[in-house]
Image: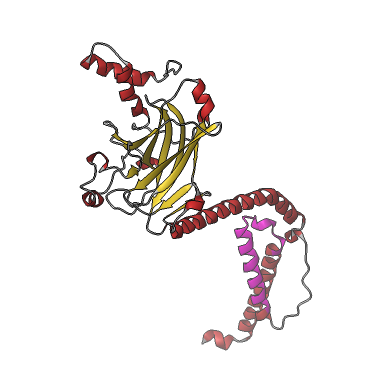
Amino acid sequence: MDTIKFENEEIIEVANSEADTESPSFSEESESCYQHLRQTGLQICTEDYPGQFNFDFSLDVTEISKRHWMYSAALNKVYIDMNRVLPIQFQWRFDDIGLLGIKNLQIRALPIFANSEFQQLCIKRCPIHIMQDKLCDRKKMEHILWCEQIDAVYEQNPISQRHSVVAIVHNFVPCSDFKTYNVLYKFMCKSSCSMSLSRRPIYVIFTLETLSGQVLGRKKIGVKVCSCPRRDMLKEEEIERKRLIGVKAFNKRTLIEDCEIPEKVQKTNKDNSEDKIYELPSLPILGKQLYLSTLELLHGHFLGSAVREDRLIDTHPLISMLSDLISQVKSEKNSHNKKIDSENPISQTN
């Protein structure tokens, strides 16, 4: 253990402060009592960290019995029924650890909420399931995650109140460069329990540690505790598939629009038919009144178009021409009316 160097000075300072109140000197035993607080404190690191020993785990899907649990590789998530055994096989490079003189290791399992807004909350069993197991070991009564190993240690951080279970790795001769170790777990509360998980997704963070709490590797996995693992797995995989399709379609559409918009604008500018001049055919109109109505209709249309396009009325040739024609027709009509009135003095007296 002399070759291991602890770089977390903050934990050592905490141990020193406690040592000053209880004993005048600091010892390795007091350090081992506080080193594990890093993995279960208020701020939890959720990033995978294989470390120099390539720490990892696997689930043997061929051993799925009666569909009590399912594993989604696409989501890296386990769907398991409550109080059912989940076998996990951990592995790490054994020779490298042996060269450092590390002989005794432990694997810690810590359940936390997946959403960052809830990660500072501790996870524990609901009161209903606690009452159902009131005769079990009091040390693990509130723990939602149980380990089937006989000498498993159930811990609770006094500051964050987080619950974790530690499986001691017993020494044995590995058959290859990698050492594998099987651990059996159970989840003792459902994701739907209103006073526990409340349907919030969770992770279980596994850390490979020395007995003094030095972290050598870290891996996480999503977990949902439900009555129908296969159904829920297929449903969430379909939701994720549609989400990915939507993201790809959005990105593809955005890319196409970015590439084609300039070309479309340029094309419409070249083929713009608004700048082309058209001529109306000769249109004979019977009667002065109908002719005047037609001129006023066209005048109103072109006048409204000029206003909508923010164009100067004087610059529109049709508007001025129609205005002149309308004035001419009206003046002729007024002259005609005056002539009629002058020829019929009786109507004026009446």
**What residue lies at 77% left-to-right and 61% top-to-bottom?**
276
Q: Residue at position x 62%, y 79% from top?
A: 338
Q: Nearer the viewer, residue 208 or 246?
A: 208
Q: Quadrant of residue 137?
A: top left
Q: 74 and 315: which one is in front?
A: 74
Please state the horizontal and vertical placement of residue 144, each as a whole percent of the image: 31, 45
Apparent side of residue 93 relative to residue 215 in the rendered image (left or right): right
Counting labels gives 0
Report the span colored magenta.
Answer: 291-318
x then y, percent, for residue 112:
37, 41
Is 205 situated above or below 7?
below
Closer-to-camera residue (158/133): 133
Towards the viewer: 234 or 98: 98
Residue 232 seen from this side: yes
Q: Is residue 56 above or below residue 234?
A: above
Quarter of the picture holding the N terminus: top left
Asked whether, in this view, residue 317 is left or right of residue 26, the answer is right
Q: Position of residue 323 (x, y in %)?
A: 67, 66
Q: Residue at x 56, y 87 (%)?
A: 347
What secondary structure do most residues of the magenta stretch adopt?
Answer: helix
